[in-house]
Image (cartoon, grey):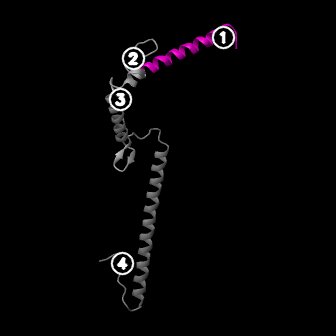
């Protein structure tokens, strides 16, 4: 037996009752479907709001850079390229060797070490200048 009643070709009273019953069933089905859609929409809105208001970010692994490639994978690949450039430069590149040499004639292990050393000296000099200026009441 199906959900809807079969309507005979005769337009007698029973056919009209069955037809009305079919319309009532169709209306009930539509109402039920609309309620399900509304419920799903509310759930989606709630989930989207929770996501938008979240206080934690996605990790680089969760973010897609290009199809099938995460941001982390792309960053790892670029880091490998940088490491390869730096690693292959080594002590054979005279510019890199020269850049690691400080004004005091001491060769640092990396250029970054020398740069941080110079930066620390600049911060110390600036701090001493400010102390002298305020100590002598010169503004």
Which of these two is toward me, 88 or 33? 88
Marks 1/4: CA–CA distance: 94 Å
Find disc 4 in the rendering and name its residue. Answer: 4
Count of numbered tags: 4
Marks 3/4: CA–CA distance: 77 Å
- The reply to whether dot 4 and dot 2 touch (C-beta < 8 Å) is no
Please say if 80 is above or below 19. Answer: above
SS category of the residue bearing label 2: loop
| x then y, percent, for residue 67 | 36, 50
Choose mark 1 or mark 3, whichever is in front: 3
- Mark 1 and mark 4 lie on one chain; the one further toward the N terminus is 4
- The reply to whether dot 1 and dot 3 touch (C-beta < 8 Å) is no
Quarter of the picture containing the N terminus is bottom left
Please say if 37 is above or below 11. Answer: above
Find disc 2 in the rendering and name its residue. Answer: 108
- The boundaries of the magenta stretch are 113-139
- The reply to whether dot 2 and dot 1 touch (C-beta < 8 Å) is no
Label 2 packing within 10 angstroms: few (<14), some (14-19), many (20+): some
| x then y, percent, for residue 82 | 36, 33
Quarter of the picture containing the C terminus is top right
Q: Residue visible at 54% across and 13% down?
A: 124
SS category of the residue bearing label 3: helix
Residue at the far top: name it: 136
Find disc 1 in the rendering and name its residue. Answer: 134
Left of 46 or right of it: where is 84?
left
- Mark 2 and mark 1 lie on one chain; the one further toward the N terminus is 2
């Amino acid at each position: 037996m199906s959900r809807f009643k079969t309507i005979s070709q005769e337009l007698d009273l029973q056919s009209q009752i069955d037809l009305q019953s079919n319309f009532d069933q169709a209306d009930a089905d539509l109402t039920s479907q609309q309620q399900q859609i509304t419920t799903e929409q509310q759930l989606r809105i709630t989930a989207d709001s929770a996501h938008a208001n979240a206080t934690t970010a996605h990790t680089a692994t969760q973010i897609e850079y290009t199809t099938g490639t995460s941001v982390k994978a792309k960053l790892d690949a670029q880091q490998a390229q940088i490491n390869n450039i730096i690693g292959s430069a080594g002590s054979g590149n005279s510019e890199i060797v020269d850049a690691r040499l400080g004004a005091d004639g001491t060769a640092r292990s990396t250029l970054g070490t020398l740069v941080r050393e110079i930066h620390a000296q600049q911060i110390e000099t600036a701090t001493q200048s400010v102390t002298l200026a305020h100590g002598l009441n010169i503004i």
